[in-house]
Image: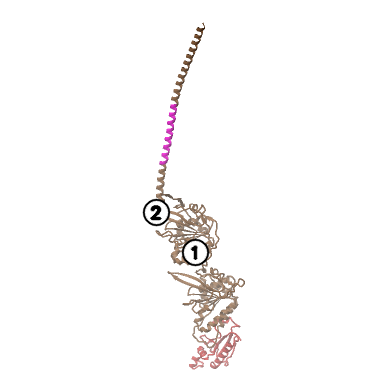
Amino acid sequence: MTKRPVQKPTETSIPAHEMWQLKLYVAGQTPKSLIACANLTRICEEHLGGRYCIKVIDLLVDPQLAKGDQILALPTLVRQLPMPVKQILGDLSDTERVLVGLDIKRLEELGWPGPHNVGI
Amino acid sequence: MPEQKDGQQSNSIQLRKCPTGISGLDEITGGGLPFGRPTLVCGGSGCGKTLLGMEFLVRGTALNEPGVFLAFEETSTELAQNFFSIGFDLDKLVASKLLDIDHVHIERSGLEPTGEFDLEGLFIRIGHAIDRIGAKRVVLDSLETLFTGYLSEGILRLELKRLFTFLKEKQVTTVVTAEQGERTLTRFGLEEYVADCVIFLDHKLSEQIATRRMRIVKYRGSSHGTNEYPFLIDENGLSIMPISSLALDHSVSEERISSGVQGLDAMMGFEGYFRGSSILVTGTAGSGKSSLAAHFVNSACQRGEKCLYFAFEESRDQIVRNMKSIGVDLEKWTEKGLLQFRNTRSTLYGMEMHLVTMHKAIEKFKPSIVIIDPISDLLVSARETKVMSMLSRLIDFLKREGITALCTDLTAVGGSLEKTEVGVSPLMDTWILLQILEGTGERNRGLYILKSRGMDHSNQVREFTLTNAGIVLREAYIGAGRVLTGTARLSQEALEKADALILTEETQRKQREVERKKTLMEAQINALQADYQAGKEELERSIMSEKMRQEILADDTRRMQQKREISSNQ
């Protein structure tokens, strides 16, 4: 399940730099991994409405990738884009904290999703 | 915490050890760290934890055991720079796949976890690094940094337990470093997890002199040295002075070596010191201790033996120059590489550090003779309680190596002769005392062998003079219950000479008298004989005439008788 895009962007008209790029690091198909995966997809669908791209990285398959993103705890979600890079750990069950951690909460308060706010 | 929980250790299942390759550490741990188990190295900041860990890995690469260094505090570039100064080329080792440095950065973002998690990522990283280069050794420096991050302590403790199990399963020998806590060994109680071997490093300041020490707090399933061992960090990494004075089992030599002074050899049965013995030369300032040492060095170098000279008072050139003035040329021996000087000020560091440096220098140069000039300077920088144990470690080490040691010791003027030898004396086999003998307006040197184990030695005080041709020992003049030296000795000798002259003359005079009396007697005998001869002749003459007269008379008588007979017949 390495680097497999879970959800393809629905609207191809969105420029690449306005896409949210997320990486989810897991280790194998453990219940924790599956829960994290499901939680992420759900949150993204609900709040990012198609402007996202998720890569799930299984460190059991690609252990060398752990070093680059300084992964210690699993599961870890890395927000690659928009900048700055952010890390959130845990199985993403606490939706509120995920929204805060990914800055989605703040952006929504500012009237997001609007084309101007994406990519801050 | 019991030292040895499982008592079923037998020879067949003896704990396997992983040699660290760090000088001295393998000796005090009895062979190294527990193989395939974690060892905790704890201590305050700057005490050398990271160095110990890294050296463990670097020395391991020499044994073809690759290592993984997980740096939680420094980046690999920083580490490479830091260790380059002590001669470890980490980049090269990394390039040749003998070393893997993984910098683990811990985000302090303060973001709360969004749900359940574990440290599987760290495990995977360690596991990957181990598998990639086939590592046998792992260092986690320092693991407790995890506690300062975002992770909750409950999860962390659970995960640490799992981590150590994981490392044990991987069969890697691990060194975990941790900061010292206020009352505990480590700030976050890591000793709870690493129960096999705990090493404590200390960097103490006493009397403004810093000393690094190491102690094995526990070592499950193995015996180990329990003392605090001083150690040193220098351009070659760590070195620990392992020698303990537990056993007195060194073999001794019957061989004798010259002291370099003929007269002194003569005092010791014409043979000199025992090889491998320790010699103490005590004396007040200027009594000639260094000169005696220089003679010893000179004679050893002449035999082609190597000497190591530790000087704490003079520089190398100063010693060479001074000894030249008494006809001992040390320069040529240094040029030939037989003699090495180590000149340091004793106040540079504490006594322990001195001993570690000395130990290291001896190990490196492998001399057969070591001079410590003077040993009293070492004692200045140490408290008396420590002196005995530290010094005995060094002396025992030297004895074990069969190295002859000559230590000089400065005694205070006016102090008791035995005062400075705070327990040094029992360690010494031969003790030579240099005394200043004062009198008649001058000070002269006297030499005396206070003790010399296992050999016949003179009990006399000798006068000790420094000439351009070296040390000369002379029998001291002993008269009227005192030893005379210097001019007093000369004048006494002159006096004796005069006395002797008078005595000879007297004898001669008496002999002449005898001769004269003899002649006189003989003359008298002659005269008497002549007298007797004269008397005798006269008497004989008168006897003769008397006889003739008697004969004539008898003749006359006979003739008359005849005549009467004739007439009567008629």
Element assignment for label 2? strand
The answer to which image quadrant residue A36 occupies is: bottom right
On the question of residue B345 being in view, the answer is no
Residue extent of the magenta highlight: B502-528
Residue receiving disc 1: B392
Q: Chain of mark 1?
A: B
On the question of residue B162 being in view, the answer is yes
Q: Is residue B549 above or below residue A4?
A: above
Residue B257: x percent and y percent? 52, 55
Residue B53: x percent and y percent? 53, 73
In the figure, what tint was chain B given?
A: brown
Q: Which mark is residue B438?
A: 2
Is residue A74 one of those drawn in magenta?
no
In the figure, what tint was chain A given?
A: red
Q: Is residue B128 above or below residue B114?
A: above
Residue B382: x percent and y percent? 44, 66
